[in-house]
Amino acid sequence: MTIKNVSDYLEEIAPLHQAEDFDNVGLLIGNETTEVKGVLVTLDTLEETVDEAIKTKCNLIVSFHPIIFSGLKKINGNSYVEKVVMKAIQNNIAIYAIHTALDNSKVGVSAKMCEVLGLSNNSILLPKDDDASGMGMIGDLPKPMPEEDFLKHTKKTFKTNGIRYSNKTGKLVKRVAVLGGSGSFAIADAIHKKADVYISADFKYHDFFKAEGKILLIDVGHYESEQFTKNLLVDYLTKKFTSFAIILSEKSTNPIYYL
């Protein structure tokens, strides 16, 4: 099996044309004709991630976030990005990034968020023209839940030391919208689709005012909202490929710490 076999399968799940225009997805480092010895799946590719790939004898890293986002004019090892690129090339390790292609997949990041929250009757929050792909999802809890209970449920589900949220509305929570990563741009859409709660990340101070008593906004953290993505990818790859190891990275790449 070659890297192309793996990338072709990933593109069935998350076609690269679905990625946002600003993004950098696909095979970032390596040659698609290379024989795959093992795949390490991670949320981010850092130096320690490449070290983990070396240790586990994986020559392909499938990463959610792209390590090369904008153009590199020099590769001298003077930044964490350059160091990762150099180490990967020196050790013949390929890197494939899936990012917003998976964000826009109906079986991608937001679908996994719905799954861990126990939502059903799910649909895409911001569908693209074909309605079969798009950002975010919206679904229903099995039964209505008081806001305080749902906040505790969310904190436990996303394994975070703290969540930020807007003023409570006083309503029961039934319909929940989610979007992995930075999602303040979809607050109005969540309100328009009658969500009781919108869970995402990277809300700024003034974003919380946009709730206007109509919705409960919950910021669980960027890493936390996307943390289950690598498990999702491991599940997909394990079902498809059996001739080499598919390894879930044990390293947390969350750059944010809490006291």
Image (cartoon, helix red, strand yellow):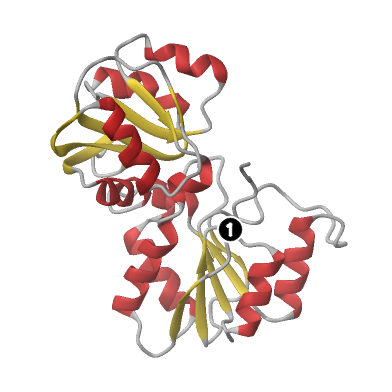
Q: Is residue 111 above or below residue 219?
A: below
Residue 122 visible at all:
yes
Give the position of the N terminus as an image quadrant.
Answer: bottom left
Rendered image quadrant of residue 34: bottom right
Which quadrant: the C terminus?
Answer: top right
Q: Amino acid at mark 1?
A: Asp
Residue 71 left/right relative to 37: right
164 vs 229: above or below: above
State the residue position of label 1.
Answer: 44
Q: At which x and y percent is residue 240? A: 31, 78
208 vs 245: above or below: above
Q: Position of residue 77 (x, y in %)?
A: 85, 62
Pinpoint residue 151: horizontal percent, then vertical percent.
34, 33
Query: Residue placed farthest to the bottom in the image?
Result: 243
Secondary structure state at the residue bearing disc 1: loop
Count of all numbered marks drawn on residues in the image: 1
Q: Residue 177's image quarter?
A: top left
Left/right placement of residue 41 relative to residue 95 reads left
Q: Residue at x 59, y 55 (%)?
A: 66
Q: Is residue 4 left or right of residue 45?
A: left
Residue at screen point 54% across, 82% down:
33
Looking at the picture, does residue 7 appear above or below residue 201?
A: below
